[in-house]
Amino acid sequence: MIRVLGIETSCDETAASVVGLREGAAPEILSNVVLSQIEEHAAFGGVVPEIAARAHVEALDGIIEAALADSDISLAEIDAIAATAGPGLVGGLIVGLMTAKAIAAATGKPLIAVNHLEGHALTARLTDGLDFPYLLLLVSGGHTQIVLVRGVGDYQRWATTIDDALGEAFDKTAKMLGLPYPGGPNVEKTAANGDAKRFAFPRPMKGEARPDFSFSGLKTAVRQAATAIAPLSEQDVADICASFQAAVSDALGDRVRRSLVRFREEYPDVKTPALVVAGGVAANREIRSTLETLCAGHGFSFIAPPHVLCTDNAAMIAWAGIERIRAGLVEPGAMDFVPRSRW
Ligand code: KG4
Ligand code: ZN
């Protein structure tokens, strides 16, 4: 059995997890502890890097102890330590990677420096045992990408945002409308009482041949609509949220469609290809149902790992460590690895 301790500190979650794999069996998440800093940042309407770094310093040792205790595995029984080494906020990355290096040095176990996006990319193999190749749609506060996942360490980015990340668009829209942080869940909740047809917001890039995303024009359109009818009633806010969400789902579906078609062309032999979603925005029900319908129409299976594994967590980092060990991709120089905020 391989057992890896994972550590994740790249944004505003302090997380540690132990994942085990017995050859021939399904992987097991032996523990998965996530401490969210949402409350520390809420008053500022977004993640404040200095506050995040300090909160990671204060919490991480206890979170690691809790992850080990929950797993009933002692540090001595761990085979390797995997830590997010980028991309992300550099203060948090330093805290996580230095702690992992210290544990590795003290125990003599190997250290694996994991790219956070690789963690998201491989989660569907932890939860669903998915085979390569497949497509990943990552929609979070910091990323909006479609990635072709060909193998461990073998990724090709097919599409990215040319301006805002999708989660960022939700958060900024919420802020403009006076809804609390984090914006995404509040926009979704408010949209439920709104009229999605009241405002004809743009569908950025819809119909364009290049596969990329854009959301900043939509944000501007929301601001103009809100300014034009201010002061906003509760119903106005709900209608804007619903119309925004409809525009986002529609634009996203159009953009993702291009990559599904491309996958079909490049991999005609894959009988049932899969689209995996990850990132906080994947929790949005309207976006999910748009993607589900799109996938069904193109013969793709739609895979959405459980919410706790879609958003930032350390189980995905521990699992990426296991995948790297099995693929023989553990680099010897990890102890010298410097965190890369833009990796
Ligand atoms: O993956 P995540 O937890 O953290 C990172 O950004 O790495 O994603 C957080 C983002 C935030 O922008 C949040 O507003 C958005 O995901 N989000 C949502 C929903 N839940 C979270 N956006 C739309 N609808 C939701 N239900
Ligand atoms: Zn993430």
Image (spheres, helix red, strand yellow):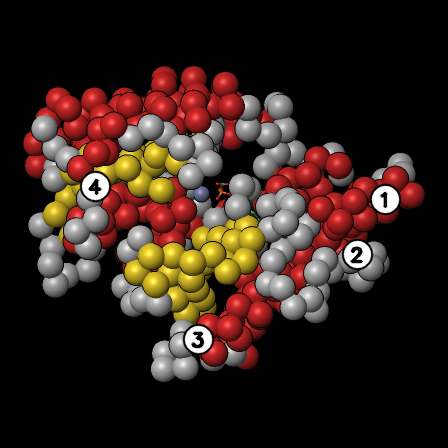
Where is residue 161? Give x, y as percent. Answer: 60, 51
Q: Quick check: 230 above or below 195?
A: above
Where does label 4 land, which residue? 331
For the point 24% across and 45% down, the residue is 321
Earlier residue among tags 3 and 4: 3
Disc 3 residue type? Glu
Where is residue 263? Give x, y as percent. Answer: 46, 72
Where does label 3 land, which residue? 266
Disc 4 residue type? Glu
Disc 3 to disc 4, C-alpha distance: 31 Å
SS for dot 4: loop
Where is residue 85? Give x, y as percent. Answer: 35, 34
Q: Quadrant of residue 103?
A: top left
Q: Quadrant of the C terminus?
A: top left
Where does label 1 land, which residue? 224
Q: Quick check: 234 above or below 139?
A: above
Q: What number of labels is visible?
A: 4
Disc 2 to disc 3, C-alpha distance: 34 Å
* Labelled pair 1, 3 in contact (Cβ < 8 Å): no
